[in-house]
Amino acid sequence: MRRLNKILVFAFTVFSAGLYSCGSKIPDSDEKQGYVLPDSLLKTLEIDTVSASKVLNTLTLTGKVDFNEDQVIKIYPAISGLVSDIKVMLGDYVKKGQTLAVLKSVEMAGFSNDYTMAKSNLGIARKSLDATNDMYKSGLASQRDQLAAQEAYNQALSGLQKSQRILNLNGGSLNGDYTVKSPIDGFVVEKQVNNNMVIRTDNSTGLFTISDLKNVWVMANVYESNIANIKSGDSVEVTTLSYPGKIFRGKVDKIMNVLDPTNKVMKLRIVLPNPGYLLKPEMFASVLVRNMENKKMISIPSRALIFDHSQYYVLVYKSPKDITIRPVQVMNTVGDRSFISEGLSDGEKLIGTQALLIYQELNS
């Protein structure tokens, strides 16, 4: 009986252990746990805040660099003559008053001769007046004679002043040369004259064009469909093929409110400073126009966006243990800022850096 009792006690113990094992859950070491952001990674992250801001639109236009017409001087021939000595070449930088070319001119020879004669006539009139004054004092000449001599002197003086002004307006040379000088500091951007060329005053072509390229115009083309999206004062970014990655910033200075009858485009003008003379007239330019709308929309830094399976996502952060993947609808992206039409609320926190890495961990 004792042996039978031991057997029964053993069987009951085994049966009880089996029941206990069936009613209790044994932790599985391979079971998936919720993702917790490591402290080491959290310290390197940047958290962005969702905010409402004015909607920013962009429009890309084509255009070209042009002279600043307010600072361009075209030099036309003031007299006729033969070009004998050209001092500058196309592209040269010149100072105000610098000689550009010298012309041999019959007209200048005539002006010089007129001046010499007027100067001689004044000397004669001066001597005659002095002699008449002496005679008048001695009673040998009448007051009428004195007045006539004075009038002759005055006319001679006026003649000299006139001939001198004409000579000075044409360079002041007494040897028949006419000197073409630059009226401003700037670059020789056009040259329409060569040595031994005969120049006439009725020639409508300028000899030289001088431009100060310290600032330039960018003339951009606006098609009819985009006219409503452009206004004076809009910020612009200009880029060129010559300087990849370099951005020249300015504003829309003037809108030409007429369409080109051939191209059906409206021109707008941007005035840009040109340090180092990097921008050259006739360069092609790409113009990015930015303008603000009066309405506001949720916006986030573009770096927070994740694109996967034809959908944009962001990581909404509440705590290291509470990170949510949320789909969003992107309306527009301007530079480093994206405007969201659906999926986020003002004030929410987003993971701004390492977002793709954390997104993959959450999906693994």
Image (spheres, helix red, strand yellow):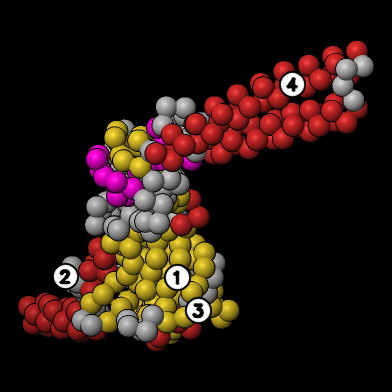
Is residue 78 among the parts visible in the rendering? yes
Mark 3 or mark 1, which has the lower sequence index?
A: 3
| Camera-side residue of 60 and 214 | 214
Q: Is residue 56 above or below residue 177?
A: below
* Location of residue 338 (image quadrant): bottom left
Q: Which residue in the structure is indicated by mark 4?
A: 128
Q: Which circle marks residue 268 in the picture?
A: 1
Q: Which residue in the structure is indicated by mark 2?
A: 30
Mark 3 or mark 4, which has the lower sequence index?
A: 4
Please tell me whether mark 3 sits on a helix, a strand or a loop: strand
On the picture, is 108 further left or further right than 262?
right
Q: Which residue in the structure is indicated by mark 3?
A: 257
Q: What's the residue type where badge 4 is placed?
A: Ser
Q: Name which residue lies at 29% across and 46% down.
A: 198
Q: Nearer the viewer, mark 3 or mark 4?
A: 4
Q: Are the residues flagged by discs 4 and 1 in contact, CB closer than 8 Å?
A: no
Please tell me whether mark 2 sits on a helix, a strand or a loop: loop
Give the extent of the magenta segment: 177-199
Q: Name which residue lies at 32% across and 70% down.
A: 62
Q: What's the residue type where badge 3 is placed?
A: Asn
Is residue 321 among the parts visible in the rendering? no
Q: Name which residue lies at 16% across and 81% down.
A: 18
Mark 2 or mark 1, which has the lower sequence index?
A: 2
* Location of residue 233 (image quadrant): bottom right
Mark 3 or mark 2, which has the lower sequence index?
A: 2
Q: Position of residue 155 (x, y in %)?
A: 72, 35
Q: Name which residue lies at 40% across and 56% down.
A: 202
CA gap between label 3 and label 1 equals 9 Å
Magenta stretch holds residue 80: no
| Camera-side residue of 11 and 33 | 33
CA gap between label 3 and label 2 equals 72 Å
Q: Nearer the viewer, mark 4 or mark 2?
A: 4
